[in-house]
Image: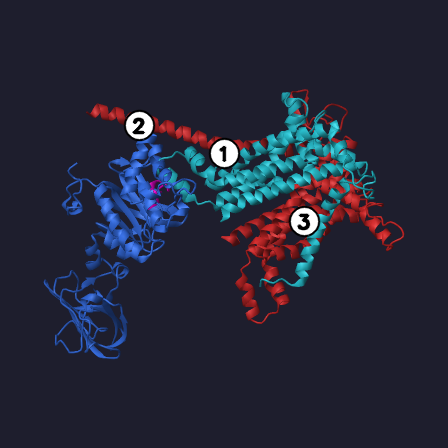
Amino acid sequence: MDSQKKIANGAKPWIEQSEKPFIRISNLTKKFGDFTAVDRVCLDIYREELFCLLGGSGCGKSTLLRMLAGFETPSDGHIEIDGQDMANVPAFARPTNMMFQSYALFPHMSVEKNVAYGLLRDGVSKSEAAEQVADMLKLVQLSDFAKRRPDQLSGGQRQRVALARSLIKRPKLLLLDEPLGALDKKLREETQFELINIQESLGVTFIVVTHDQEEAMTLSTRIGVMDQGEIVQVGEPHEIYEFPLSIFIADFIGSVNIFMGRVSDDATNYVRIHCREADCDIHVSHGVSCTQNQKLWFAIRPEKLTITRENPRGKYNVVKGIVDEIAYRGNLSIFRIKLASGKMLRVTKSNRSRRDEDAISWDDNVYISWDDTAGIVLVQ
Amino acid sequence: MSFSANKATFGTLIKRTLVKRIRFRGRSLVIGIPLWWLIVFFLIPFVVVAKISFSEAIIARPPYSSLLEWKEGGFLLLKLHFSNYLYLLEDSLYISAYWSSIKVAFFSTLIALLVAYPMAYYIARSTERRRNILLMLIILPFWTSFLLRVYAWIGILKTHGIINNILMSLGITSEPLVMMQTNFAVYVGIVYTYLPFMILPLYTNLVKLDNSLLEASADLGANPLTTFFKITLPLSVPGIIAGSMLVFIPVVGEFVIPALLGGPDTLMIGKVLWDEFFSNRDWPVASAVAIVMLVLLVIPVMLLRNAQNASRAAST
Amino acid sequence: MKKSSWFVATATVLGFAFLYIPILSLIIFSFNKSRLVTVWAGFSTQWYGKLFADPQILGAAWISLKIAFISASLAVVLGTLAALVLVRFRRFHGKNLLGAMIIAPLVMPDVIIGLSLLLLFVAMEAMFGWPAGRGLTTIIIAHTTFCMAYVAVVVQSRLVDMDESLEEAALDLGAKPARVFFDVTLPLISPALVSGWLLSFTLSLDDLVIASFTSGPGASTLPMVIFSKVRLGVSPDINALATIIIVMVAIGVLLAATWMKPKRV
């Protein structure tokens, strides 16, 4: 169909509303006794998306995934996949496949047999299945390991077998539960890009569950942030990062500095916030719907702050402080600055030059400044 | 177009309902087979025993009276004979037998515990390789015939048996010691046969004991003996209870060991039940004896269940 | 503390001696020339000859083997089903009942199990005409019933240890629940099934009390024959029988140990 690789080429059906959602989750709820694990979740996911469910442990993301797979029965709500209601459809009859966190490879079967298993259950002939298995193993670069058993493979190889096994049936929806959690950092980065490539070339819709927000931002077309069983924000990665809807989300994704203050001047194209912590006024150059003297928060990312020795001489958006800690990360340095009010700020600066004679050091007096548009106002 | 769509959805609806029915049937079958087997061949027998314990012994086949009788007027009369239970209470034989069974079971459990604990401790603290060999050595006798092993003690304990022969030939005693057909022999036989049942639960518990707890205790100044009594012993209580119940409960009703090694004054309720049934042919009384035994064992069984649940919770 | 005190070590050695001296005495005196079992009169294998010429013992042995084989096999099927259902099925009517019934035989005195089953068989015969008299069938039913409890315990512990996500993965790939059991669960719990079978076989072969209650004319099991002989006193052909059994078991256990070792590496 023409919609193949649409998203890969930059289409955004969730904005354009050009097609019907492929997966429709409405009011999905799951209770275990008194405890509500998933609370009235509504999500629309489009074909070929790589959608990430992001949240801390216990937020309900794994339960949501298991309900999609058919391993948990919802207490309330509906799941529709490609127009078909999944109520009463058992796990083995669903057009979904899952890649388990522990990989769940059958230890008593070879790699080949593991990957072929799903096809054989569909009634595919043995010879036909063998062909498809060979193709898939080539795709994940494991052709030489076909006859080996899972306990003879490394962690990364096992992960690829699990992926091959779950993709070979070309499911309508692939569910991945913390797929990269068991891999070390370097391998994880490589695998992330491989995963995206495979997803784009096969055109399968992915839903990935993860607690790693960097991973979520690298992989996804859109992220759904979950907290305590609810979806608190859905959007593209940069949307979530730069325009979080709440302090929780701002703090969960990456690091952030939050100032608390009161509206001192509310106009149509700017807002001024009086902030005692910062000992200055914050000027935000866009209108915010609020009232005079309302309590607000101002969130700004560490990389959006500029740290200088000299006073940048601005009326707003400048604070003074003392360098408390420096963490040198090679490509960037992270500064912890203590303001006069005692508040701590986190500032990152990329190390542009190889040697900096005038480098800022501990206990220096510095000025932190930022642009009018660099931060975001939050009301919750 | 809409007609074929309806036909398709109707077809899938039928298929899905059938599949659901079959899956439900399959599930019920899988549950039902073991469940009903046990209900018929384990639970109902106890009901039958209870029923017969309320009937009278008569000369007939089967040798007990029916509980229900049709009377004129067309109603059923339920005749419950409590005489069997009263008989148990009146005749001191039975009460003595119950009491003596519990006593024997209690003391043999205690002795078994004292013998088994050091062994279980040693095995639990050994290296893995040695542990496997020792465990195998513990389990090996269990796989050989229990009857034959008890029989072996006859040869060892009897008047011209091995022990007496050795003692007399070494000149330690001039006359043979009477060990067979005594309570002593019964205790030896019971401890001997049930030792593995005491060792294994103790071992399972002790092997899970975190070594760093003992190290912490030593680090805080406790000598080995104190560490044992204050740390190891209290933590091994679930194992002690499990092992004790695994010995105590079956020993109360034990028959073979008192029959082979015990004497005429060895009163154990298992033997009494056997004699009541095979020698006296008094089925109702035998049934009453069994029911009372069951009632007596309810509390120890609940103790065992609690101990098992506790150890399961502790290991998660 | 890896070192155990000398007290514990000594106690352990004594304990093992206690366990094995009777077994050794059985073996030694099976080769005794004299009929007086415990007085050594010289080496002889005559009792082995006598043993194999005794039709009563050989007949009983054959019956016991048959019963043990059938009971063990039935017990494995029933016990595995019970274990599966108790561990994997979340809720169903009768779960508590099944759970209680499956562990009760483990601790119940044999006399009670034997008596209750016999009374059941008698009552059933009176009501339905089946089982017609006691014999092999009734013994097999009785043995299966208490052996399945042991199988269930063994299989249950293996099922609990097994990674449930393997079964979920198979379901996810399109295998129906029955398929999942045969493709994934069964292969992975097979060691437990084997040890359950062996355990049941041994227990059945060894049982005296329950067989005595539930047996009938012409169906004397080996333990029943041994018991009646042994009540009358010590008998050296029984020693010979004991030795044969001990040696077979020892070989079996050693084989099992070596067969299992490579898998661990």
Q: Quadrant of residue A377?
A: bottom left
Residue contact between numbered discs 2 and 1, judged by CB atoms under 8 Å: no
Q: Which mark is residue B31?
A: 1
**Which residue bears the numbered disc 3?**
B195
Quarter holding the C terminus of chain A is bottom left
Chain assigned blue: A
Colour assigned to chain C in the rendering is cyan
Q: Which residues are magenta?
A: A65-74
Q: Amino acid at mark 2?
A: Thr
**How busy is the neighbourhood of tag 2: few (under 14 within 10 Å), some, or many (20 plus)?**
few
Most extreme residue toward the right is B174
Q: Is residue B14 above or below residue B194?
A: above
Q: Amino acid at mark 3?
A: Leu
Q: Quadrant of residue B43?
A: top right
Does the rendering let one see residue A301? Answer: yes
**C-alpha gap between disc 3 and disc 2:** 62 Å
